Image (spheres, rainbow, N blue to C red):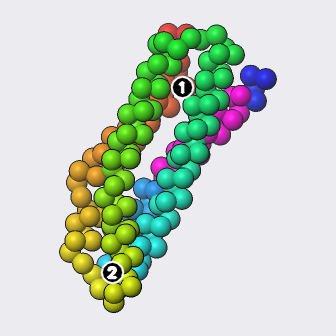
Amino acid sequence: MYDWLLLFHVAGAILFFAGMAVAAVGLAAARRRERPSEVALLLGVTRWGVALVGLGTILVVGFGAWLVEDGNWGWGGWVGWALALLAVSAGLGAAGGRAPRRARELAERLADEGDRPSDELRRLLHGRVAGWLNTGAAAAAVVVLALMVLKPGT
């Protein structure tokens, strides 16, 4: 049973990080475009990445909790830190995703109104605050991964 739980837990982690990669690549590609229709298309792809992150999170937490109970590790120590950092990562990622979501909505509207470049769209795409929030989310997720692999104190 343990092997199956671990398989689905690891599959969740893979989906989580794959989703982060899809979202990051879609946003980076959108930043290089001028036409709102292209920006809207690329930011639409990032929504798939966000969905993968959500599915991965559900699998990681659900099967991780089952593993903790099955492995008798308890909820303190590295498990508690991993859960706290996963929550931090989710919060930072959600906050960092607001500007790209607004950029996608604006790009869709601008594409319907003549598909001309916009300074407001460019500002939303290149916002430093969103970039730092997303970087913080990724950093917290990498620390969670390190905790899961190393399991310090066990």
Q: Nearer the viewer, residue 145 or 1?
A: 1
Q: Which mark is residue 9?
A: none
The quarter of the image holding the N terminus is top right
Badge 1 crowding class, 10 Å Cα cut-off, few under 14, some 14 to 19, many 20 or more, is some
Locate residue 98, reporting x and y percent.
33, 55
Is 9 left or right of 84, judged from the image as shown?
right
SS of the residue under disc 2: helix
Q: Is residue 71 above or below residue 139?
A: above
Give the residue pinned by disc 2: 110
Q: Quadrant of residue 74?
A: top right
| Magenta span contains residue 16 | yes
The extreme right residue here reads 1
Query: Which residue is under mark 1?
Result: 148
The magenta span reads 5-21
Taking the spot 49% from the left edge, 53% from the top edge, the residue there is 50
Observer-nearest residue: 130 or 148?
130
Residue 32 seen from this side: no
- State the image quarter where residue 61 is shown: top right
Q: Is residue 127 visible?
A: yes
Between 62 and 16, the one nearer to me in the picture: 62
Mark closest to the chain's N terminus, 2 or 1: 2
Q: Position of residue 147 (x, y in %)?
A: 49, 24
Q: Disc 2 residue type?
A: Leu
Residue at screen point 24% across, 78% down: 118
Element class at badge 1: helix
Question: Who's the residue at 38% across and 45% down the image?
Answer: 93
Q: Residue at x 69, y 35 (%)?
A: 8
Figure check: 145 above or below 19: above
